[in-house]
Image (cartoon, coloured by chain):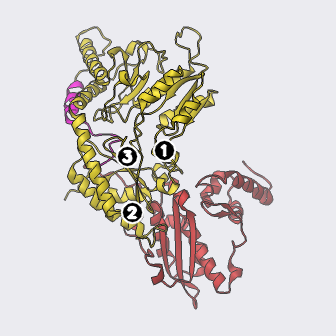
Amino acid sequence: MQQRTVYLDNNATTPLHPEVIKTLTEAMENYGNPSSLHQYGRHSRTEIEKARERIAHFIGAEPEEIIFVGSGSEANNTVLSSLTCQPVGHCEVGCQSSASIVTTNIEHPCILESAKCLKDRGMTVDFVKVDRDGKVDLEEYRSMLTPNTGLVSIMMANNETGTIQDIKLLARIAHENGSLFHTDSVQAVGKIPVNVKELDVDFLSLSAHKIYGPKGIGVLYVKKGVAFCPLIRGGHQEGGRRAGTENTTGIIGLGKAIEMRELEMASEAKHLLELKQLLKEGFSANIPDIEFVGHQEDCLPGTLNVSFSGAEGESILLYLDLEGIFVSTGSACASGSLDPSHVLLAMGLEAESAHGSIRISMGRDTTREDVEYVIEKMENVISRIRSMSTVYHGRN
Amino acid sequence: MADQGGWIYSDTVKDHFMNPRNILRDEKGFKYDGKGKTGNIKCGDEMIVFISVDKEKNQIKDCKWQTYGCASAIASTSAMSEMVKGMDLDVAYKVSPKDIVKELGGLPDSKIHCSVLGDKALRMAIDSYYTQNGMAEKVTTKEALIICECMEVTDHEIEEAVLEGARSFYELQEITKISTGCGECRQDATMLLQEYTNKHFGECSI
């Protein structure tokens, strides 16, 4: 008998939407270089521009504000690295070289590592702390902004906890200080409504594979008129802002994924919120000594981070894996590093809670039966681990 | 999906993880002669080893344990508990992480440093047996100074590791797992490594 599998790691990546697979399959026939002037090339160009318009419309941007890049990480790296641009030579952009950056200590590593790299190069970088719910500390944020702050970069929704920041407010505060504002929205776009005009952000990053699109394609939104310096040079593609022959197939796939998001996002969010409620009730009723991590209201609909006292995350993950349930953990042991999740520690969780945390990220395929199966198996797995634990011994 | 993908652990590890042997679920139900605890929740692994001793033969009669930790922590403690049953105390005292890893059919490199702690807990259990049974002179690490809180590595062990051939910090970690937890002792450990290398060999490569 084939084992039942329940994929609950949609914040890591998502399966392709069936409609996206169809579109991709057709698009792969279409090999013309969009820069070519002949029919094949023009056809690719048309498809790319259609996708660009659709994405722009979805996030409330203008098509010329959309730059296709290779990933969310590339989008984020591009924004931060543009700050090192020097006002020399023929680069008309270099206006930020003396600037400092403010970001948070719960960002994705592609922001944190880039920020640390800038720091090593002599730039001032400040990391705002978050509270126990994972929300940015507004008081500290305000105090860190100085006349030198060229850029603020704060993620919209956290990948580990799902906690959503008040980007509109954070961007306004940055602008009042004269700073540009970037938001890494890789986990947010396509899951919750995002409108760049309404939020008034200058840069925004998104990625296709988190929303049932293909891997290897992302978008950097750059507000019209905002200084921007390319990371990858040497081609006229994307208006000279991102060199390299376009990933035509990926772009078309992302366009389709966004089209499907327009149709499905709202109803899916409602469905996932119901399932999350079921999970929380099921866990709470059956398993003592647990903690739901992160802000429980301002949270991505499909993300639930839960910490089990006395049980270590990698063990939980692997026992669940044996049951066909696929999740992720903030435990150090699973990450190959020695420290548990930087996000959970930044929120002030004790190391034990961080080691015992599991992230469940549901998606469009998740069903009520899946959730019931998970509740049933989780209870067994946790009591099994606790029964051999030094910490929990005698408590259950 | 057709292919489940290789498990990151060997079949033996998987077996011990799925069916751990000799867990002590009820401390009151097991009459033990020695108990040792090592590791630290903060670092992600903690274990307690309990032994009962055949006092005539000076052998470990039974070995039970509790572990908070990842799959390889669970599996390595389980495997060790099987290994040492019936073993002479003198022999059991010298069981090393390397012996346990061998028993398990190997572990990923990143796991050896942080998850194989059972031998330390076992040594402490034997120490506690010795102390309680008038053989305190056999306790070799009693006066040692703990340098690494997370992994409970002492200065004596650093010296031993140097005598075994450790010259670089990495080699020291290979042998002792020192500073693989919070990392705070790294500087102290590096200084001691240098000190003992100088003491015994008059040289230091770091």
Q: Residues within 10 Å of mark 2 (few under 14, many from 20)?
A: some
Give the CA distance from mark 1 to mark 3: 16 Å
- Residue A322 in view here: no
The vertical placement of A159 against B153, above or below, is above
Identify the hue of chain B.
red
Which lettered chain is shown in yellow?
A
Q: Position of residue A359 (x, y in %)?
A: 38, 49
Span of residues in magenta: A7-27
Residue drawn at x 69%, y 81% is: B136
Give the camera-side residue of A76 and A132: A132
Element under label 1? helix
Question: Is A305 situated left or right of A25 in this image?
Answer: right
Q: Which residue is mark 2?
A: B14
Q: Which residue is mark 1?
A: A343
Give the CA distance from mark 2 to mark 3: 36 Å
The image's mark for residue A296 is 3
Question: Is A39 situated left or right of B11 in this image?
Answer: left
Residue drawn at x 62%, y 63% is: B152
Q: Which amino acid type is marked by label 2?
A: Lys
Give the camera-side residue of B80 and B49: B49
Q: Which amino acid type is marked by label 3?
A: Gln
Q: Residues within 10 Å of mark 3 (few under 14, many from 20)?
A: some
Element under label 3? loop
Question: Marks 1 and 2: same chain?
Answer: no
Q: Position of residue A228 (x, y in %)?
A: 48, 17
Question: Marks 1 and 3: same chain?
Answer: yes
Splitting the image into 4 quarters, where does residue A273 fall?
Answer: top left
